[in-house]
Amino acid sequence: MKKILVIIFILCFVSAVFADDFHYENIIVGDRASGMGGAYIAVSDDAAGMYYNPAGIAYSVGRNLSASVNAYHNLEKKFDGVIGNYGWKRSSSALIPNFFGIIQPVGNFKLGLSYAVPDSIKEDQDQVFLNVNANVNRYVINLNNDDNTYNIGVTIAKDITKKFATGLTLYLHRRETQMIFNQFIERTTPPAYEWTNNYLEVTETGIKPVLGFMFSPVDKVSLGLKLSKIFIIDSNSVYQETLARNGYSSAPTNLPDVTPTAKFSTTDSKRKYPYNIGFGVAYFPSNSLIVSADVNYYTKVDDDIFGDKKATLNLALGTEYYFSKTWAVRGGLFTNRSNSPNLPNGGRTAFSPIPEDTDIYGASLSISRFTRNTSITLGGNFSYGTGEAQVVSGSSSLQDETIKSWTIFISSSYSY
Amino acid sequence: MKVNIIIIIIISFFIASISSAGESYRKRQSLAEDRYTQSDVEEEIRFGREISARILGRIPLYNNKELTSYINLLGKALAENCSRSDLEFYFGILDTEEVNAYSAPGGYVFVTKGALKYVNDESELAGILAHEIAHITERHIVKELNIKGIEDDPVSGFARFIGGGTDVAKVAFAQAVDKALDILFKNGYRRENEIESDKIAVFITAGTNYDPKGLLRYLDRISALEEKRINVGKTHPLYEKRLSDLENFIKDEVGAGSFYKNRSRYESIIKRAKIK
């Protein structure tokens, strides 16, 4: 659906423009996992296992393992027909230290330490739209938005039998958001302007336990199960809006003049996160091939402040093939489906993001070069989706949305 | 309801897993066993030297020049018939009444003064030394702890560069030394490693013309001591099956032959060293 909006609605634009809150699998974490589309719950036998299924590290090969991943992540969202005939395009790109992990055997246990960045947005936008319509000759947007989620934590895992293992990762969850959104709208004849500045800061701290189980019911087949949820312990959110308007009081806009006015709101409400139940199956037909599949289910969330989320199911398929002792390729397919409640959704607050209902589908590929103790991997993934978004607060109008995302990464791992 | 389903799934998988296959299928082609490089051997020696220093930090050497010279002559003769010509072997006597013998990777072998008291001839001592040499030649600790040298490969160097692995390697080395000492003084080698060393010791002693049954006689004697709970190191488990396996192995692989025991030479040296 495509609807041309009157520009003045933009005055009520995005009160909060967040990281991709309406999708759960925004950045695929890990070395091998990134190439395999994130289908890793039943594999998990290296450092990335601490993130996907901590039970898996009980079966890690080698005494000590470490891995680090550095990724360049790009996200582009385009909302059609928002600004007159113009689309509104937002893009984010950032170099992310995506993952670091180290595993150490201690007695009959495997202990680990890992750091992951499952979501990161860095937007810098500076756009000018000219002659949008009769009421707007110039529309300027300046947006700066940083929204990062960090997980750092410890893992303990134990193989209870040779075919059954369990593990627990306890992550410290930290999310920091800072957004400055400046809009200036100008009409030359007769002269009129409106200026809006929005500032949003959200800092939240919590814990994210990840409980995992790994089973091998038959030879060469592994089943993985993981349960996790983020529990927010402390949260602080500040929203500030400053508005000034002059000259738009006559028809057809009929908006009163406003001397510069600042509005503040704060909340210590804690964002609610879903339970994540992940199930994976992996088949190891030989020492050169793995095929794996994951299902991740996220429960429904009722959150009046930060926005409701519907129950969501994501799938991933991955494979890894060693065409020699020193080279391997990986490939994967994955979904990143929208958790947005049905649109239009009239319940937005200053702290809730733009509702969008766009399912994303992606593919990944990587290649690794091994030496005896180390490996280097180069890879990337691309995802794409189209759907709808409800960009303008207070309006039930929906806009077509297109999301494109790509990531390239380089990673290394060692065993000692 | 959901929680109950999850619990049922977990229990079902656990029960199913008890009687099913292991996890060896996880080993990827990139981790397949590779030949050992010069760098690996250098690291093995460095590692063994560190362990030996730690052993001697716990138990001092028994300072008797003639006995030390004798055991080195005997040990080096045996080492001539082992599979590791890339190593220089060193032998020493530890000044303790505990009945035991130790070896560290890289060629370091120690036998205790207490053990020498229960040895009756040179072939038995040869059997003990050959058993310890076999732990070294078969790299039992090296494999258990995955001791490897630093790779010269540029890919490996780049991987370390972007991952900052140097400090991790240093920590791993120190931890591996501790684990090796745990193997030597607390936990012992794997059972299969002990049996393998017994068998290789048979070939080494027979190849040097010592009676391969020397080790068997010594182990049998020590086994009786253990039953009486006399001061025997617990890291070389003695059990009936081990002895019977060894006896059968000697019968099958060596058979009857003319081998030296050198009882009188051993006794006279031990007497001069005032061990017994």
Image: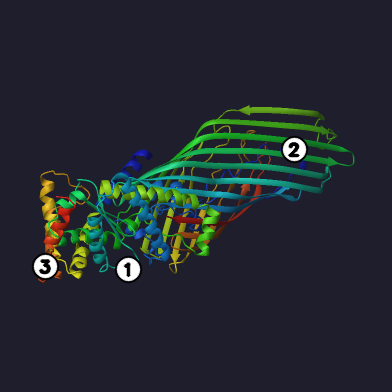
Q: Residue at point 51% right, 50% down?
A: A29
Q: Are marks 2 and 3 in contact (CB under 8 Å)?
A: no
From the image, which quarter does the N terminus of chain B lie in? top left
Quarter-wise, where is residue B262 in the image? bottom left
At label 3, counting other C-alpha atoms closer than 10 Å, the crowd grade (few under 14, some 14-19, many 20 or more) is: few
Left or right for A194, reference B184? right
Q: Amino acid at mark 1?
A: Ser
Q: Is disc 2 surrounded by few (<14), some (14 to 19) or many (20+) residues within 10 Å?
A: some
Name the mark nearer the viewer: 2 or 3.
3
Residue B79 seen: yes
Is B92 rendered above or below residue A326?
Answer: above
Residue lying at 12% horizontally and 48% vertically, measured from the top left: B225
Q: Which one is in front in this view, the residue at disc 2 or the one at disc 1?
A: 1
* SS at mark 1 in the image: loop
Observer-nearest of A121 and B233: B233
**Picture coordinates of residue B272, whole percent (x, y):** 17, 54
Of the pair B269 and A332, the residue shown nearer to us: B269
| Alpha-carbon span between mark 2 and mark 3 | 96 Å
**Left of B58 or right of it: where is A373?**
right
Res. B251 mark: 3
Give the residue at mark 2. Answer: A11
Q: Amino acid at mark 2?
A: Leu
| Residue A132 vs residue A104, the one in the foreground | A104
**Mark 3 falls within which chain?**
B
Where residue A66 appears, as percent x and y from the top left, is 46, 52
Q: CA distance from mark 2 to mark 1?
A: 83 Å
Question: Could you confirm whether marks 2 and 1 are on the same chain?
Answer: no
Mark 3 is on which residue type? Lys
| Residue A399 pos. (x, y %) | 66, 47
Distance of label 1 from label 3 (alpha carbons) = 28 Å
